[in-house]
Amino acid sequence: MRYYFDIQDDFVAVSDSEGTEYDSLEVATREAIVAVTSIARDVFTSKGAQVTLTVRSEDRPLFEMTVRLDRKELD
Amino acid sequence: MAFPDREIEMTKAEITGPFLKRLRVSTEIDEEDERAINSLPIVNKRMVNGEPIASVGDRPTACCLVIDGFVLRSKIVGNGQRQVLSFHQPGDVPDLQSLFLHVMDHDVTALGNCMLGCIPHGPLRELLKRRPSVAQALWRDTLTDAAIFREWICNIGQRDATSRVAHLVLELYARLKAIGRTDGLSFSFPATQALFADAAGTSVVHMNRVVQELRSQGLLDFDRGRISILDEARLRKTADFDALYLHLNPSL
């Protein structure tokens, strides 16, 4: 099945028009986790604080994953 | 057969042109060396996008010279993910190592449609014995190859995804410019975003974001097989790019 991954973070919003073929929802989910966490690293080191990845099939949204950087001052 | 014209008639000068051009710039080969290279038996072969040239475990009996188009080296890791190790352009001999390391430890694949010249190992080994300058030139080539791999380790290990992709593009641009295959600040390169992701060690999704970011910052544009650098100075800064490791200038 074809999956589409839209990204929304502090700097850019990317709508995936091409999509990528994955054998199962499980494989697509793994890809989503790898992508959202690696994007988060780049966004957070550039002073951003949140990345949301929305995964869609051809005809409907399937799920959303958000990675947020929470910082608490201790001093 | 799908390709009746798979073996193409070309003059030796056309076949070895980009290769000799590169050796001339960076090494001390003379006319006699060039004649010796031009007298090697070379069989031309057309390959289509994705076609394997040599695969892990193979024992090649010839080295392939890229005459036209592009070739990539890659390795499939345990979980089936592919890491692209290098891109090769006209004049490169991407499986030169098979001359001395007999079993392939990675895959060599056509990137887009390309034209190769297969040089049998026997005559190439003989040539290296007879012409020390050619042997030195190919040794230098192998060392430059290693320098590029070192830079790729730095790139993938230490830079963020945006810098990695910017770096990759500037490397391609610098190497293609050296053989006269750029058009101003743009060049044709048939890699998909998925392939770029495998070379930069990112996911396709992350690659998508990088492309959008580089575009929206006015640094570079990818358009169906064509890459255009929009702001070279800023792209260099983003990429942390210094062409020293390419050793394109032998006088340094």
Image (cartoon, grey):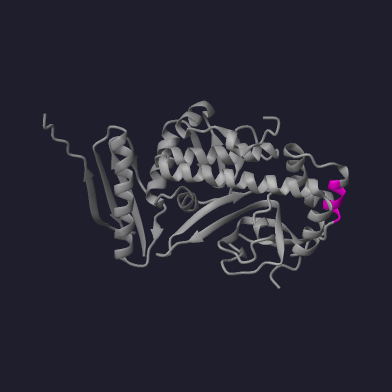
The image quarter containing residue A62 is bottom left
Q: Is residue B252 above or below residue A64?
A: above
Q: Position of residue B140 (x, y in %)?
A: 68, 44
Q: How many marks?
A: 0
* Residue B42 shows up from this direction: no
Q: Nearer the viewer, residue B200 or A18?
A: B200
Vertical order, B241 against B126 (above or below): above
Give the answer, above or below, for where B126 lies relative to B197: below
Q: Nearer the viewer, residue B26 or B203?
A: B26
Where residue B120 appears, as percent x and y from the top left, is: 76, 63
Residue lying at the far left in this picture: please name it. A74
Specify the quadrant of the image occupied by residue B78: bottom left
Residue at 82% from the left image edge and 60% from the top image edge? B41
Where's the C terminus of chain B, which quadrant? top right
Q: Quadrant of residue B105?
A: bottom right
Residue B165 coordinates in the image, percent (x, y): 47, 41
Which residue does the image show at 70% across and 51% down from the upper left? B68
- B37 within the magenta span: yes
Provide the residue span drawn in magenta: B33-39
